[in-house]
Amino acid sequence: MAQETEHEDSGEPVERKGKLTSTLLLVTLVSTIGSSFQYGYNVASVNSPAPFMQSFYNETYREHYGTQMTANLETILWSLTVSLYPLGGFFGSLLVGPMVNNIGRKGTLLVNNIFSIVPAILMGTSVLSRSFEVIIASRLVIGICAGLSSNVVPMYLGEMSPKNLRGAIGVMPQLLITIGILMAQIFGIRMILGNEDGWPILLALTGIPAVIQLMTLPFFPESPRYTLLQKGKEEKAKKALQRLRGWDDVDGEIKEMYQEDQSEKAEGRLSVRNLCTFRPLRWQLICIIVMNMGQQLSGINAVYYYADTIYAQAGVPDETVQYVTVATGSVNVVMTLAAIFIVDSWGRRLLLLLGFGTCCTACVVLTIALVYQSTVQWMPYLSIACVIIYVIGHAIGPSPIPYVITTEMFRQASRPAAFMVAGSVHWLSNFTVGLIFEFLRKGLGSYCFILFAAICLATFLFIFFVVPETKGKTFLEISQIMAKKNGLDEKTDSKEFLDFQDLNPPMKDVTMEKSDNVKITPL
Protein backbone atom coordinates (compact mmCIF):
# COMPACT_ATOMS: atom_id res chain seq x y z
CA MET A 1 0.00 0.00 0.00
CA ALA A 2 1.42 3.30 -0.97
CA GLN A 3 2.08 5.38 2.10
CA GLU A 4 0.86 8.94 2.60
CA THR A 5 3.13 11.40 4.38
CA GLU A 6 2.87 15.14 4.84
CA HIS A 7 5.12 17.49 2.94
CA GLU A 8 7.07 19.57 5.43
CA ASP A 9 6.25 22.97 3.83
CA SER A 10 2.74 22.74 2.45
CA GLY A 11 1.21 20.22 4.82
CA GLU A 12 -0.31 18.46 1.81
CA PRO A 13 -0.29 14.66 1.78
CA VAL A 14 2.39 13.31 -0.53
CA GLU A 15 2.09 9.76 -1.77
CA ARG A 16 5.12 7.55 -1.41
CA LYS A 17 4.90 4.74 -3.93
CA GLY A 18 5.73 1.26 -2.77
CA LYS A 19 8.75 -0.51 -4.19
CA LEU A 20 9.62 -4.11 -4.88
CA THR A 21 11.91 -4.81 -1.93
CA SER A 22 13.98 -7.96 -1.66
CA THR A 23 11.71 -9.25 1.13
CA LEU A 24 8.55 -8.72 -0.93
CA LEU A 25 10.13 -10.31 -4.00
CA LEU A 26 11.42 -13.35 -2.11
CA VAL A 27 8.17 -14.01 -0.22
CA THR A 28 6.30 -13.75 -3.53
CA LEU A 29 8.62 -16.30 -5.15
CA VAL A 30 8.61 -18.67 -2.17
CA SER A 31 4.81 -18.71 -1.81
CA THR A 32 4.07 -18.99 -5.54
CA ILE A 33 6.75 -21.60 -6.32
CA GLY A 34 5.83 -23.60 -3.23
CA SER A 35 2.06 -23.46 -3.77
CA SER A 36 0.82 -22.06 -7.11
CA PHE A 37 3.40 -24.01 -9.13
CA GLN A 38 2.01 -27.27 -7.73
CA TYR A 39 -1.52 -26.37 -8.82
CA GLY A 40 -0.43 -26.02 -12.44
CA TYR A 41 1.94 -28.97 -12.34
CA ASN A 42 -0.75 -31.37 -11.14
CA VAL A 43 -3.23 -30.14 -13.75
CA ALA A 44 -0.98 -31.48 -16.54
CA SER A 45 1.15 -34.16 -14.87
CA VAL A 46 -1.19 -37.08 -15.69
CA ASN A 47 -1.84 -36.13 -19.33
CA SER A 48 1.29 -37.45 -21.04
CA PRO A 49 1.80 -40.69 -19.05
CA ALA A 50 -1.92 -41.61 -19.23
CA PRO A 51 -1.41 -44.77 -21.41
CA PHE A 52 1.29 -46.13 -19.08
CA MET A 53 -0.73 -45.34 -15.95
CA GLN A 54 -3.82 -47.04 -17.39
CA SER A 55 -1.70 -50.08 -18.23
CA PHE A 56 -0.49 -50.13 -14.61
CA TYR A 57 -4.11 -49.95 -13.42
CA ASN A 58 -4.90 -53.04 -15.53
CA GLU A 59 -1.87 -54.99 -14.32
CA THR A 60 -2.43 -54.37 -10.62
CA TYR A 61 -6.17 -54.99 -10.90
CA ARG A 62 -5.45 -58.38 -12.49
CA GLU A 63 -2.92 -59.15 -9.71
CA HIS A 64 -5.36 -58.22 -6.96
CA TYR A 65 -8.59 -59.70 -8.28
CA GLY A 66 -7.43 -62.38 -10.71
CA THR A 67 -9.51 -61.06 -13.59
CA GLN A 68 -9.15 -58.55 -16.42
CA MET A 69 -10.50 -55.05 -15.85
CA THR A 70 -13.46 -54.22 -18.08
CA ALA A 71 -13.28 -51.26 -20.45
CA ASN A 72 -16.06 -49.45 -18.56
CA LEU A 73 -14.29 -49.88 -15.21
CA GLU A 74 -11.02 -48.64 -16.71
CA THR A 75 -12.81 -45.54 -18.01
CA ILE A 76 -14.42 -44.92 -14.63
CA LEU A 77 -11.14 -45.30 -12.72
CA TRP A 78 -9.27 -42.99 -15.09
CA SER A 79 -12.10 -40.45 -14.95
CA LEU A 80 -11.81 -40.53 -11.16
CA THR A 81 -8.03 -40.01 -11.41
CA VAL A 82 -8.59 -36.86 -13.45
CA SER A 83 -11.79 -35.47 -11.89
CA LEU A 84 -10.99 -36.03 -8.20
CA TYR A 85 -8.32 -33.33 -8.50
CA PRO A 86 -10.79 -30.44 -9.09
CA LEU A 87 -13.21 -32.04 -6.63
CA GLY A 88 -10.42 -31.95 -4.02
CA GLY A 89 -9.89 -28.32 -5.03
CA PHE A 90 -13.52 -27.62 -4.11
CA PHE A 91 -13.08 -29.24 -0.69
CA GLY A 92 -9.86 -27.26 -0.20
CA SER A 93 -11.71 -24.02 -0.95
CA LEU A 94 -14.17 -24.81 1.85
CA LEU A 95 -11.25 -24.94 4.31
CA VAL A 96 -9.90 -21.50 3.38
CA GLY A 97 -11.98 -19.38 5.76
CA PRO A 98 -11.54 -21.42 8.96
CA MET A 99 -7.81 -21.93 8.37
CA VAL A 100 -6.76 -18.39 7.42
CA ASN A 101 -8.77 -16.92 10.29
CA ASN A 102 -7.34 -19.29 12.90
CA ILE A 103 -3.72 -19.90 11.88
CA GLY A 104 -3.16 -17.03 9.45
CA ARG A 105 -2.28 -16.83 5.76
CA LYS A 106 1.31 -17.97 6.19
CA GLY A 107 0.35 -20.66 8.69
CA THR A 108 -2.21 -22.06 6.25
CA LEU A 109 0.37 -22.28 3.47
CA LEU A 110 2.79 -24.09 5.78
CA VAL A 111 0.20 -26.64 6.94
CA ASN A 112 -0.99 -27.06 3.34
CA ASN A 113 2.39 -28.57 2.40
CA ILE A 114 1.27 -31.75 4.18
CA PHE A 115 -1.41 -32.17 1.49
CA SER A 116 1.34 -32.14 -1.13
CA ILE A 117 4.26 -34.02 0.40
CA VAL A 118 2.27 -37.06 1.60
CA PRO A 119 0.47 -37.75 -1.73
CA ALA A 120 3.72 -37.08 -3.64
CA ILE A 121 5.41 -39.87 -1.66
CA LEU A 122 2.42 -42.20 -2.13
CA MET A 123 2.22 -41.63 -5.89
CA GLY A 124 5.98 -41.99 -6.28
CA THR A 125 5.95 -45.37 -4.52
CA SER A 126 2.70 -46.66 -6.07
CA VAL A 127 4.54 -49.06 -8.41
CA LEU A 128 6.53 -50.50 -5.50
CA SER A 129 3.36 -50.92 -3.43
CA ARG A 130 1.49 -52.28 -6.49
CA SER A 131 -1.52 -50.08 -5.78
CA PHE A 132 -3.38 -47.87 -8.23
CA GLU A 133 -5.85 -46.99 -5.47
CA VAL A 134 -3.29 -44.77 -3.71
CA ILE A 135 -2.87 -42.74 -6.93
CA ILE A 136 -6.62 -42.04 -7.10
CA ALA A 137 -6.79 -41.15 -3.39
CA SER A 138 -3.66 -39.00 -3.68
CA ARG A 139 -5.20 -37.00 -6.53
CA LEU A 140 -8.07 -36.06 -4.19
CA VAL A 141 -5.68 -35.01 -1.41
CA ILE A 142 -3.41 -33.02 -3.71
CA GLY A 143 -6.55 -31.36 -5.06
CA ILE A 144 -7.24 -30.13 -1.52
CA CYS A 145 -3.73 -28.65 -1.55
CA ALA A 146 -4.47 -26.86 -4.84
CA GLY A 147 -7.82 -25.60 -3.57
CA LEU A 148 -6.20 -24.03 -0.53
CA SER A 149 -3.17 -22.59 -2.33
CA SER A 150 -5.16 -21.14 -5.24
CA ASN A 151 -7.09 -18.98 -2.76
CA VAL A 152 -4.64 -18.33 0.07
CA VAL A 153 -1.61 -17.27 -2.01
CA PRO A 154 -3.46 -14.37 -3.78
CA MET A 155 -4.92 -13.31 -0.42
CA TYR A 156 -1.52 -13.43 1.32
CA LEU A 157 0.32 -11.52 -1.40
CA GLY A 158 -2.52 -9.04 -1.98
CA GLU A 159 -2.54 -8.06 1.69
CA MET A 160 1.23 -7.51 1.74
CA SER A 161 1.61 -5.61 -1.54
CA PRO A 162 1.64 -1.82 -1.96
CA LYS A 163 -1.32 -0.67 -4.03
CA ASN A 164 0.83 0.38 -7.01
CA LEU A 165 2.26 -3.18 -7.24
CA ARG A 166 -0.78 -5.14 -6.11
CA GLY A 167 -1.86 -6.02 -9.66
CA ALA A 168 1.56 -7.23 -10.81
CA ILE A 169 2.17 -9.27 -7.66
CA GLY A 170 -1.41 -10.55 -7.85
CA VAL A 171 -0.70 -12.03 -11.29
CA MET A 172 2.36 -13.92 -10.01
CA PRO A 173 0.35 -16.92 -8.71
CA GLN A 174 -1.16 -17.41 -12.18
CA LEU A 175 2.29 -17.07 -13.77
CA LEU A 176 3.62 -19.90 -11.59
CA ILE A 177 0.51 -21.97 -12.38
CA THR A 178 1.31 -21.67 -16.10
CA ILE A 179 4.98 -22.46 -15.43
CA GLY A 180 3.86 -25.53 -13.48
CA ILE A 181 1.75 -26.67 -16.45
CA LEU A 182 4.69 -26.08 -18.80
CA MET A 183 7.15 -28.00 -16.60
CA ALA A 184 4.74 -30.95 -16.40
CA GLN A 185 4.48 -30.90 -20.20
CA ILE A 186 8.27 -30.83 -20.57
CA PHE A 187 8.88 -33.58 -18.02
CA GLY A 188 6.08 -35.55 -19.68
CA ILE A 189 7.93 -35.81 -22.98
CA ARG A 190 8.47 -39.50 -23.79
CA MET A 191 12.26 -39.30 -23.71
CA ILE A 192 12.27 -37.63 -20.28
CA LEU A 193 9.71 -38.96 -17.75
CA GLY A 194 6.56 -39.55 -19.81
CA ASN A 195 7.35 -43.24 -20.25
CA GLU A 196 6.74 -46.60 -18.57
CA ASP A 197 9.60 -46.25 -16.07
CA GLY A 198 9.51 -42.50 -15.42
CA TRP A 199 5.86 -41.66 -14.71
CA PRO A 200 5.99 -42.38 -10.92
CA ILE A 201 8.88 -39.90 -10.64
CA LEU A 202 6.90 -37.41 -12.74
CA LEU A 203 4.03 -37.58 -10.24
CA ALA A 204 6.31 -37.48 -7.19
CA LEU A 205 8.18 -34.32 -8.23
CA THR A 206 5.29 -32.19 -7.02
CA GLY A 207 6.53 -32.68 -3.45
CA ILE A 208 9.83 -30.85 -4.05
CA PRO A 209 8.37 -27.29 -4.17
CA ALA A 210 6.39 -28.08 -1.01
CA VAL A 211 9.55 -29.08 0.85
CA ILE A 212 11.30 -25.89 -0.31
CA GLN A 213 8.38 -23.76 0.91
CA LEU A 214 8.24 -25.61 4.23
CA MET A 215 11.91 -24.79 4.87
CA THR A 216 11.93 -21.15 3.69
CA LEU A 217 8.51 -19.55 4.31
CA PRO A 218 8.88 -19.46 8.14
CA PHE A 219 11.60 -16.80 7.70
CA PHE A 220 9.11 -14.34 6.13
CA PRO A 221 6.44 -12.24 7.85
CA GLU A 222 2.75 -13.00 8.20
CA SER A 223 0.29 -10.68 6.45
CA PRO A 224 0.52 -7.33 8.32
CA ARG A 225 -3.23 -6.76 7.90
CA TYR A 226 -4.00 -10.11 9.52
CA THR A 227 -1.44 -9.47 12.29
CA LEU A 228 -2.87 -6.02 13.09
CA LEU A 229 -6.60 -6.32 12.49
CA GLN A 230 -7.26 -9.92 13.50
CA LYS A 231 -4.50 -10.53 16.07
CA GLY A 232 -4.18 -6.97 17.40
CA LYS A 233 -0.37 -7.04 17.36
CA GLU A 234 0.53 -3.55 16.16
CA GLU A 235 4.27 -3.69 16.80
CA LYS A 236 4.62 -7.00 14.99
CA ALA A 237 2.59 -5.63 12.08
CA LYS A 238 4.82 -2.53 11.94
CA LYS A 239 7.98 -4.62 11.84
CA ALA A 240 6.52 -6.74 9.05
CA LEU A 241 5.61 -3.63 7.05
CA GLN A 242 9.05 -2.13 7.59
CA ARG A 243 10.64 -5.28 6.14
CA LEU A 244 8.22 -5.37 3.22
CA ARG A 245 8.38 -1.65 2.35
CA GLY A 246 12.06 -0.96 2.96
CA TRP A 247 11.49 2.12 5.13
CA ASP A 248 10.79 2.73 8.83
CA ASP A 249 7.89 5.20 8.68
CA VAL A 250 4.85 2.95 8.15
CA ASP A 251 2.45 4.76 10.50
CA GLY A 252 0.43 6.12 7.59
CA GLU A 253 -0.25 2.60 6.34
CA ILE A 254 -1.05 1.35 9.83
CA LYS A 255 -3.56 4.18 10.09
CA GLU A 256 -5.15 3.23 6.77
CA MET A 257 -5.60 -0.32 8.08
CA TYR A 258 -7.31 1.00 11.22
CA GLN A 259 -9.47 3.18 9.01
CA GLU A 260 -10.50 0.16 6.94
CA ASP A 261 -11.20 -1.82 10.12
CA GLN A 262 -13.35 0.97 11.55
CA SER A 263 -15.40 1.37 8.38
CA GLU A 264 -16.26 -2.35 8.25
CA LYS A 265 -17.05 -2.87 11.94
CA ALA A 266 -20.73 -3.15 11.04
CA GLU A 267 -19.95 -6.23 8.94
CA GLY A 268 -18.30 -8.22 11.72
CA ARG A 269 -16.56 -11.48 10.85
CA LEU A 270 -18.67 -12.71 7.95
CA SER A 271 -19.43 -16.38 7.31
CA VAL A 272 -20.22 -17.58 3.80
CA ARG A 273 -23.93 -17.65 4.64
CA ASN A 274 -23.86 -14.10 5.96
CA LEU A 275 -21.82 -12.93 2.99
CA CYS A 276 -24.42 -14.27 0.58
CA THR A 277 -27.18 -12.26 2.29
CA PHE A 278 -25.22 -9.12 3.21
CA ARG A 279 -26.51 -6.25 1.07
CA PRO A 280 -23.40 -3.99 1.25
CA LEU A 281 -21.37 -6.74 -0.48
CA ARG A 282 -24.02 -7.97 -2.92
CA TRP A 283 -22.43 -6.72 -6.16
CA GLN A 284 -18.92 -7.65 -5.05
CA LEU A 285 -20.13 -11.21 -4.55
CA ILE A 286 -21.93 -11.30 -7.90
CA CYS A 287 -18.80 -9.97 -9.64
CA ILE A 288 -16.45 -12.65 -8.31
CA ILE A 289 -18.97 -15.43 -9.00
CA VAL A 290 -19.46 -14.34 -12.62
CA MET A 291 -15.72 -13.84 -13.24
CA ASN A 292 -14.73 -17.20 -11.76
CA MET A 293 -17.48 -19.01 -13.65
CA GLY A 294 -16.48 -17.21 -16.84
CA GLN A 295 -12.83 -18.10 -16.26
CA GLN A 296 -13.50 -21.86 -16.15
CA LEU A 297 -16.63 -22.17 -18.36
CA SER A 298 -15.02 -20.15 -21.16
CA GLY A 299 -13.46 -23.38 -22.44
CA ILE A 300 -9.77 -23.10 -21.57
CA ASN A 301 -9.56 -26.73 -20.44
CA ALA A 302 -11.57 -27.84 -23.48
CA VAL A 303 -9.21 -25.99 -25.83
CA TYR A 304 -6.21 -27.70 -24.24
CA TYR A 305 -7.99 -31.04 -24.43
CA TYR A 306 -8.89 -30.56 -28.12
CA ALA A 307 -5.53 -29.06 -29.08
CA ASP A 308 -3.79 -32.39 -29.76
CA THR A 309 -6.59 -33.43 -32.13
CA ILE A 310 -6.42 -30.09 -33.92
CA TYR A 311 -2.66 -30.37 -34.32
CA ALA A 312 -2.95 -33.94 -35.65
CA GLN A 313 -5.64 -32.91 -38.17
CA ALA A 314 -3.36 -30.11 -39.36
CA GLY A 315 -0.78 -32.73 -40.30
CA VAL A 316 1.50 -32.52 -37.26
CA PRO A 317 3.09 -36.01 -36.78
CA ASP A 318 2.09 -37.89 -33.62
CA GLU A 319 5.64 -37.88 -32.26
CA THR A 320 5.80 -34.10 -32.73
CA VAL A 321 2.46 -33.21 -31.14
CA GLN A 322 3.92 -33.27 -27.61
CA TYR A 323 6.50 -30.65 -28.60
CA VAL A 324 3.81 -28.43 -30.15
CA THR A 325 1.86 -28.77 -26.89
CA VAL A 326 4.95 -27.60 -24.99
CA ALA A 327 5.20 -24.63 -27.37
CA THR A 328 1.56 -23.74 -26.62
CA GLY A 329 2.32 -23.93 -22.90
CA SER A 330 5.28 -21.61 -23.47
CA VAL A 331 3.00 -19.05 -25.14
CA ASN A 332 0.75 -19.22 -22.07
CA VAL A 333 3.71 -18.49 -19.77
CA VAL A 334 5.02 -15.61 -21.90
CA MET A 335 1.63 -13.88 -22.11
CA THR A 336 0.97 -14.27 -18.38
CA LEU A 337 4.40 -12.74 -17.78
CA ALA A 338 3.40 -9.85 -20.06
CA ALA A 339 0.26 -9.34 -17.96
CA ILE A 340 2.46 -8.71 -14.90
CA PHE A 341 4.02 -5.68 -16.59
CA ILE A 342 0.79 -4.16 -17.92
CA VAL A 343 -1.84 -4.92 -15.27
CA ASP A 344 -0.98 -1.84 -13.16
CA SER A 345 -0.81 0.50 -16.17
CA TRP A 346 -3.58 -0.83 -18.42
CA GLY A 347 -5.83 -1.78 -15.52
CA ARG A 348 -7.70 -4.91 -14.52
CA ARG A 349 -10.95 -4.11 -16.34
CA LEU A 350 -9.33 -3.51 -19.73
CA LEU A 351 -7.34 -6.75 -19.57
CA LEU A 352 -10.48 -8.70 -18.67
CA LEU A 353 -12.37 -7.16 -21.60
CA LEU A 354 -9.52 -7.76 -24.04
CA GLY A 355 -9.11 -11.33 -22.81
CA PHE A 356 -12.74 -12.42 -22.95
CA GLY A 357 -13.25 -10.57 -26.25
CA THR A 358 -10.26 -12.35 -27.79
CA CYS A 359 -11.43 -15.76 -26.47
CA CYS A 360 -14.95 -15.20 -27.83
CA THR A 361 -13.66 -14.31 -31.30
CA ALA A 362 -11.18 -17.21 -31.32
CA CYS A 363 -13.92 -19.72 -30.40
CA VAL A 364 -16.20 -18.49 -33.21
CA VAL A 365 -13.43 -18.63 -35.83
CA LEU A 366 -12.22 -22.00 -34.47
CA THR A 367 -15.72 -23.43 -34.96
CA ILE A 368 -15.79 -22.26 -38.58
CA ALA A 369 -12.29 -23.63 -39.18
CA LEU A 370 -13.16 -27.04 -37.70
CA VAL A 371 -16.35 -27.30 -39.77
CA TYR A 372 -14.59 -26.55 -43.06
CA GLN A 373 -11.16 -28.08 -42.39
CA SER A 374 -11.92 -31.16 -44.49
CA THR A 375 -12.95 -29.10 -47.53
CA VAL A 376 -10.61 -26.09 -47.40
CA GLN A 377 -6.92 -26.97 -47.48
CA TRP A 378 -5.61 -24.17 -45.28
CA MET A 379 -8.33 -24.37 -42.58
CA PRO A 380 -6.36 -26.71 -40.26
CA TYR A 381 -3.65 -24.06 -39.97
CA LEU A 382 -6.30 -21.48 -39.08
CA SER A 383 -7.42 -23.89 -36.34
CA ILE A 384 -3.90 -23.93 -34.88
CA ALA A 385 -3.78 -20.12 -35.01
CA CYS A 386 -7.13 -19.93 -33.17
CA VAL A 387 -5.86 -22.20 -30.39
CA ILE A 388 -2.78 -20.01 -29.90
CA ILE A 389 -4.81 -16.77 -30.04
CA TYR A 390 -7.29 -18.18 -27.54
CA VAL A 391 -4.46 -19.10 -25.15
CA ILE A 392 -3.01 -15.58 -25.50
CA GLY A 393 -6.39 -13.98 -24.75
CA HIS A 394 -7.03 -16.15 -21.72
CA ALA A 395 -3.51 -15.61 -20.34
CA ILE A 396 -3.69 -11.80 -20.27
CA GLY A 397 -7.06 -11.47 -18.55
CA PRO A 398 -9.46 -14.30 -17.66
CA SER A 399 -6.79 -16.53 -16.09
CA PRO A 400 -4.96 -14.12 -13.72
CA ILE A 401 -7.23 -11.12 -13.06
CA PRO A 402 -10.14 -12.73 -11.13
CA TYR A 403 -7.71 -13.57 -8.29
CA VAL A 404 -6.59 -9.93 -8.14
CA ILE A 405 -10.16 -8.61 -8.21
CA THR A 406 -11.30 -10.96 -5.43
CA THR A 407 -8.54 -9.65 -3.16
CA GLU A 408 -9.31 -6.02 -3.96
CA MET A 409 -13.12 -6.02 -3.76
CA PHE A 410 -13.29 -7.36 -0.21
CA ARG A 411 -11.80 -6.10 3.02
CA GLN A 412 -10.33 -7.95 5.97
CA ALA A 413 -13.51 -9.20 7.64
CA SER A 414 -15.14 -10.51 4.47
CA ARG A 415 -12.09 -11.56 2.38
CA PRO A 416 -11.75 -15.17 3.69
CA ALA A 417 -15.45 -15.91 3.07
CA ALA A 418 -15.20 -14.26 -0.37
CA PHE A 419 -12.27 -16.49 -1.33
CA MET A 420 -14.21 -19.53 -0.14
CA VAL A 421 -17.07 -18.61 -2.48
CA ALA A 422 -14.77 -17.70 -5.38
CA GLY A 423 -12.70 -20.84 -4.94
CA SER A 424 -15.74 -23.08 -4.70
CA VAL A 425 -17.21 -21.60 -7.89
CA HIS A 426 -13.82 -21.90 -9.64
CA TRP A 427 -13.31 -25.57 -8.79
CA LEU A 428 -16.92 -26.66 -9.30
CA SER A 429 -16.91 -25.00 -12.73
CA ASN A 430 -13.60 -26.72 -13.50
CA PHE A 431 -15.06 -30.07 -12.39
CA THR A 432 -18.21 -29.50 -14.46
CA VAL A 433 -16.31 -28.79 -17.68
CA GLY A 434 -14.16 -31.89 -17.18
CA LEU A 435 -17.26 -33.97 -16.52
CA ILE A 436 -19.44 -32.87 -19.45
CA PHE A 437 -17.00 -31.82 -22.17
CA GLU A 438 -16.64 -35.30 -23.67
CA PHE A 439 -20.43 -35.51 -23.96
CA LEU A 440 -20.55 -32.04 -25.53
CA ARG A 441 -17.84 -32.98 -28.00
CA LYS A 442 -19.65 -36.16 -29.04
CA GLY A 443 -23.05 -34.47 -29.21
CA LEU A 444 -22.16 -31.13 -30.77
CA GLY A 445 -18.83 -31.89 -32.44
CA SER A 446 -17.05 -28.76 -33.61
CA TYR A 447 -20.04 -26.63 -32.63
CA CYS A 448 -19.30 -27.09 -28.90
CA PHE A 449 -16.99 -24.09 -29.09
CA ILE A 450 -19.96 -21.86 -29.95
CA LEU A 451 -21.23 -22.56 -26.44
CA PHE A 452 -17.90 -21.38 -25.01
CA ALA A 453 -18.03 -18.29 -27.26
CA ALA A 454 -21.47 -17.43 -25.84
CA ILE A 455 -20.16 -17.73 -22.26
CA CYS A 456 -17.18 -15.50 -23.12
CA LEU A 457 -19.53 -12.91 -24.66
CA ALA A 458 -21.88 -12.96 -21.64
CA THR A 459 -18.93 -12.50 -19.26
CA PHE A 460 -17.54 -9.69 -21.45
CA LEU A 461 -20.87 -7.81 -21.31
CA PHE A 462 -21.14 -8.25 -17.54
CA ILE A 463 -17.63 -6.87 -16.98
CA PHE A 464 -18.28 -3.97 -19.37
CA PHE A 465 -21.44 -2.85 -17.57
CA VAL A 466 -20.76 -3.83 -13.95
CA VAL A 467 -17.10 -4.35 -12.95
CA PRO A 468 -15.24 -1.11 -12.00
CA GLU A 469 -11.55 -0.38 -12.45
CA THR A 470 -9.61 -1.02 -9.23
CA LYS A 471 -6.00 -0.23 -10.16
CA GLY A 472 -4.14 2.19 -7.91
CA LYS A 473 -6.91 2.33 -5.28
CA THR A 474 -6.86 1.38 -1.61
CA PHE A 475 -9.17 -1.35 -0.36
CA LEU A 476 -11.27 1.34 1.31
CA GLU A 477 -11.61 3.41 -1.88
CA ILE A 478 -12.71 0.31 -3.82
CA SER A 479 -15.23 -0.42 -1.08
CA GLN A 480 -16.67 3.09 -1.48
CA ILE A 481 -17.05 2.61 -5.24
CA MET A 482 -18.92 -0.66 -4.71
CA ALA A 483 -21.05 0.89 -1.96
CA LYS A 484 -22.59 3.15 -4.61
CA LYS A 485 -23.43 0.12 -6.78
CA ASN A 486 -25.10 -1.45 -3.76
CA GLY A 487 -27.15 1.71 -3.23
CA LEU A 488 -25.35 2.63 -0.01
CA ASP A 489 -23.35 5.62 1.20
CA GLU A 490 -20.35 4.47 3.23
CA LYS A 491 -19.23 6.93 5.89
CA THR A 492 -17.10 6.75 8.99
CA ASP A 493 -17.27 9.18 11.89
CA SER A 494 -13.78 10.61 12.29
CA LYS A 495 -14.22 11.01 16.05
CA GLU A 496 -14.16 7.25 16.45
CA PHE A 497 -10.55 7.21 15.30
CA LEU A 498 -9.52 9.25 18.31
CA ASP A 499 -10.16 6.16 20.44
CA PHE A 500 -7.29 4.31 18.75
CA GLN A 501 -3.96 4.24 20.50
CA ASP A 502 -1.59 7.07 19.68
CA LEU A 503 0.40 6.69 16.51
CA ASN A 504 3.61 8.48 15.66
CA PRO A 505 3.11 10.95 13.94
CA PRO A 506 -0.18 11.93 15.69
CA MET A 507 -3.39 10.64 14.17
CA LYS A 508 -5.17 12.87 11.70
CA ASP A 509 -8.91 13.42 11.46
CA VAL A 510 -10.20 11.23 8.66
CA THR A 511 -13.50 11.89 6.94
CA MET A 512 -14.74 9.51 4.27
CA GLU A 513 -16.91 11.48 1.94
CA LYS A 514 -19.40 10.16 -0.55
CA SER A 515 -16.87 10.67 -3.30
CA ASP A 516 -14.33 8.02 -4.20
CA ASN A 517 -11.48 9.88 -2.47
CA VAL A 518 -10.43 9.88 1.15
CA LYS A 519 -10.05 13.40 2.51
CA ILE A 520 -7.18 13.75 4.98
CA THR A 521 -6.97 16.96 7.00
CA PRO A 522 -4.52 17.69 9.81
CA LEU A 523 -5.79 18.34 13.32
Image (cartoon, rainbow, N blue to C red):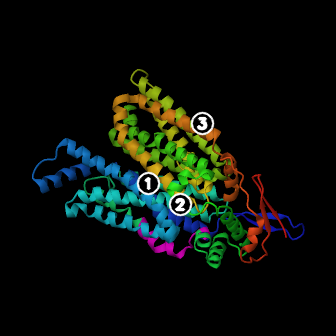
User: Which marked residue is nearer to the observer: mark 1 or mark 2?
Assistant: 2
Q: Which of the 4 image quadrants contains residue 73?
A: top left
Which secondary structure class fits the magenta region best? helix
Q: Which residue is mark 1?
A: 40
**Residue 515 magenta:** no
* Image quadrant where residue 204 sits: bottom left
Mark 1–mark 2 distance (CA, rounded to whole Å): 22 Å
| Place of residue 448 in the rendered image (x, y in percent of width and height, measured from the top left) | 42, 31
Magenta residues, start to end: 209-225
Q: Give percent across and percent down for residue 283.
A: 60, 47
Residue drawn at (13%, 52%) of the image: 62
- Mark nearer the N terminus (1 vs 2): 1
In the current view of this chain or complex, which residue is farthest to the top? 375
**Image quadrant of residue 361?**
top right
Depth order, front residue of 190/167: 167
Q: Nearer the viewer, mark 2 or mark 3?
A: 2
Residue at 53% x, 56% y is: 274
Identify whether 403 is placed above or below 437: below
Q: Residue furthest right?
A: 9
**N-term mark: 2 or 3:** 2
Residue 416 tag number: 2
Kind of residue at disc 1: Gly
Viewer-proximal residue among 369 and 475: 475
Badge 2 element: helix
**Amino acid at the residue labelled 3:** Leu
Which structural element holds mark 3? helix
Task: Measure the alpha-carbon separation of dots 2 and 3.
Answer: 28 Å
Instruction: Report which residue position mark 3 lands on.
Output: 461
| Nearer to me, 339 or 377 | 339
